[in-house]
Amino acid sequence: MEKPINTPLQPQACGLCGGKDYLVVSDRDAKSGDPLEIGLCSGCGLVQQTQRPTSEDLQIYYSHHYRTDYKKNYEPKLKYVFRAGLAARNRMRFLNHAQLLETMGGRKFLDVGAGGGEMVYAAQRAGLKAIGIEPNQGYSSFAREAYNTEIATCGLDELQQSGFAIITMFHVLEHMPDPLAVFRRLFGLLDADGHLLIEVPNIEQADTSPSNIFFKAHLYYFSKATLLAAASLGFEPIQIEDQGNLRILFRRKSSITPLVLPPQETVAHTRLRLSQKGWGEYLTVGGGWRRPFQRLRNRARETLNARGTPLGTLERALA
């Protein structure tokens, strides 16, 4: 099957403000070296692919190709189960710190882009009525079989349920072609007192290798300002972490409201941050020089814990 994400595309308007004036900040895919134009919108500061695939092309790509492109496997290896388990433990602690778990116990929980199902399992373990959706057939089947979790093989538009108390979306929004449509959909899926936890790469962070910033799978590159702006039509932030990845916990508003776009001084700040990125910043301010040592430590930890069954490996990560 061909990968339609590689087909020629027409330039598109900004996914946040609708503008068409871009400052081109990159013209190459950092992973493959293929042509890939990335622009900073002069109107709102959202960094994005200026030519994006259709929703139909993306549905095929994420159902069949994405996991094998970037993980080289159709279902997660044990080392990825362990990594996802550690991430799920960290995210559950974040929700617990926000005192959501004690107030939302027994209510419905949804993880969008659930991958191998580790977050759904962790939420279920914490007493939530947890389900997930994952478009990739291999990963969603793995989640159902390995953890006995309810993971539907579908996208957000295909979900039939609603009335969720908590929805989580980790490193998913940047892959979706219409972020404003996503926030409207999430607004409709949540209860009136519902909460939304989103995590995305932070385009302004200093600790991302220049060889791993811009690539075809990421359609958008959010800053704190642009993520808050996109969510502003239906959500208000109640907790923000922006050191490293960008993680924001939102509370649902009572109704959809007009977007609040970033001011021009914020756009100028993002433009400045992009000009500062490079190997020098990454190795010094971003601590990139430590990465080889961190990788060795993590491999040793994975060798010790990523063994036996996927469930056993996950339980060790969540412990």
Image (tube, helix red, strand yellow):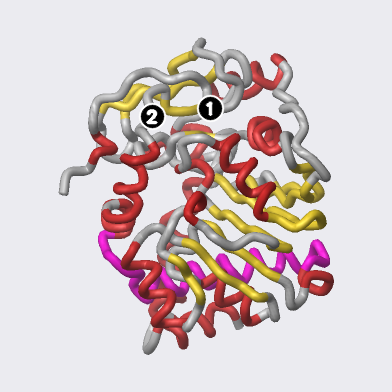
59 lies left or right of 105: left
Question: Over which residues does the magenta segment extend?
Answer: 72-100
Mark 2, Cα crowd under 10 Å, few <14 / some 14-19 / many 20+, is: many
In this view, 239 is above or below 127: above
- Kindly tell me whether residue 293 is visible in this rendering: yes
Name the image quarter holding residue 106: bottom right
> Is residue 167 covered in magenta?
no
Q: Residue drawn at (56%, 65%), measured in percent from left and top?
A: 87
**Vertical arrangement, residue 312 with respect to residue 160, above or below:** below
Q: Please give left or right for residue 316 compared with residue 101 in the image.
A: left
Disc number placed over residue 247 in the picture, else none:
none
Residue at 27% x, 64% y is 73
- Snapshot quadrant of residue 308: bottom left
Residue 115, horizontal then vertical, whole percent? 44, 63
Amino acid type, mark 1: Gly
User: Picture coordinates of residue 157 (x, y %)?
Assistant: 50, 49
- The residue beneath circle 1 is 15
Q: Is residue 209 above or below residue 162?
A: above
Q: Nearer the viewer, residue 165 or 73?
A: 165
Residue at mark 2 to residue at mark 1: CA–CA distance: 10 Å
Q: Residues within 10 Å of mark 1 (few under 14, many from 20)?
A: many
Does residue 297 appear in this view?
no
* Main secondary structure type of the part rendered in magenta: helix
Q: Which residue is mark 2?
A: 52
Please name the amino acid that badge 2 sits on.
Answer: Arg
Camera-side residue of 119 and 210: 119
| Cβ atoms at labels 2 and 1 below 8 Å apart | yes
